[in-house]
Image (cartoon, grey):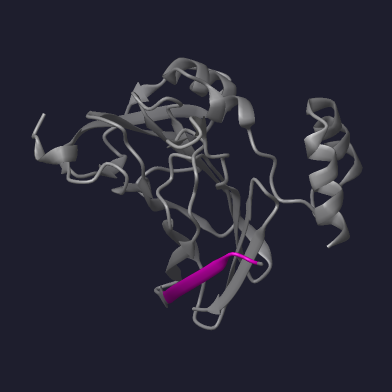
Amino acid sequence: MKRRSFLKGTLATGAAAVAANAGLLTPSTVLAEWNEKAFKAKTVDDGLSAMFGTTSMSESGDIDLSAPAIAENGAVTPIKIDATKMDGVESIAIMATKNPSPMVCRYDFSGPAVGYVSTRIRMGETMNVVAVVKAGGKLYKKEQEVKVTIGGCGG
Amino acid sequence: MSIKIRMRGRAKGGVAEVKALIKHKMESGARMNKKTGKPYPADYINVVEVLVNGTKAIDSQWSGAISANPYMGVKVKANKGDEVTLKLEDLNGQTGEHTIKV
């Protein structure tokens, strides 16, 4: 519990303290670093470059992205990404293009992991969902439009 | 108070699908409090880890765009009897941890 209060105290004092924090605690004791810049980015490109350092992606048919064509409730949109057909999957990220901050989540795989993720995300309006898969050092994507029908109007 | 987690998983052919339901409001920081005109402060889970027998398998970062009471389904290489652990932490430093045998 000491570490907890220590973290709280230092986080409050800003970015400099966060940097010091990272240096003081060894990676084995602290959970993974959270990429605040990528998650606060306002555009898809900004989010991508903050997260992966590049915005160039190629379309891939090997990514299996399943999302509803019409989501009745945008606050709970089930998304499933299956990249098990690809070799050397390092990470999977989900982006919702028109959300205030498009980067939704990122999963990094190592050791005993398999390239598969399913989750539920929030979507404000009808937009494209992009599955970004990093495999063998390259970025691949698969896009799908999800219609959000809040208020029962089929937009 | 730690974050409540419900977890289930079954190993089949060396791969286990693990599903977890987490009880958390996932306040994104964008929702306005109509009475005060100010947004509710953000409070969501941002760091998630999955371990198999203590070895790290998945490192995940979440944003406020993950639905309230999040569901997460992942697959890991594990055999029957292996232990799968889920660890999480939110913006306020609250943590949760749960281990199951697949």
Q: Which residue is farthest front?
A: B35
Q: Is A61 positioned to the left or the right of B56 in the image?
A: left
- Please indicate, yes or no, whether residue A105 appears anywhere in the rendered image: yes
Residue A109 to residue B95: above or below: above
Q: Which residue is farthest bottom?
A: B81
Residue A68: percent from left, percent from top: 19, 44
Question: Within the image, what quadrant is residue A64 found in?
Answer: top left
Secondary structure character of the magenta stretch overall: strand
Identity of the residue drawn at 63% across and 64% down: B96
Identity of the residue drawn at 58% across and 22% down: A50
Q: Is residue B9 magenta?
A: yes
Residue B87 to residue A46: above or below: below
Residue A110: percent from left, percent from top: 59, 50
- Please indicate, yes or no, whether residue A69 appears anywhere in the rendered image: no
Residue B63 to residue A3: above or below: above
Identity of the residue drawn at 44% across and 43% down: A87
Q: Is residue B85 magenta?
A: no
Residue A77: percent from left, percent from top: 29, 46
Q: Is B52 positioned to the left or the right of B15 in the image?
A: right
Give, as a single range, the part of the protein colored magenta.
B2-10
Residue B69: percent from left, percent from top: 43, 58
Question: Within the image, what quadrant is residue B18 found in?
Answer: bottom left
Taking depth in this image into account, of A65 and A152 the one nearest to the observer is A152
- Looking at the rendered structure, the number of numbered marks drawn on it comes to 0
Identity of the residue drawn at 45% across and 34% down: B32
- Which quadrant, please, contains the N terminus of chain B? bottom right
Taking depth in this image into account, of B67 and A81 the one nearest to the observer is B67
Taking depth in this image into account, of B3 and A23 the one nearest to the observer is B3
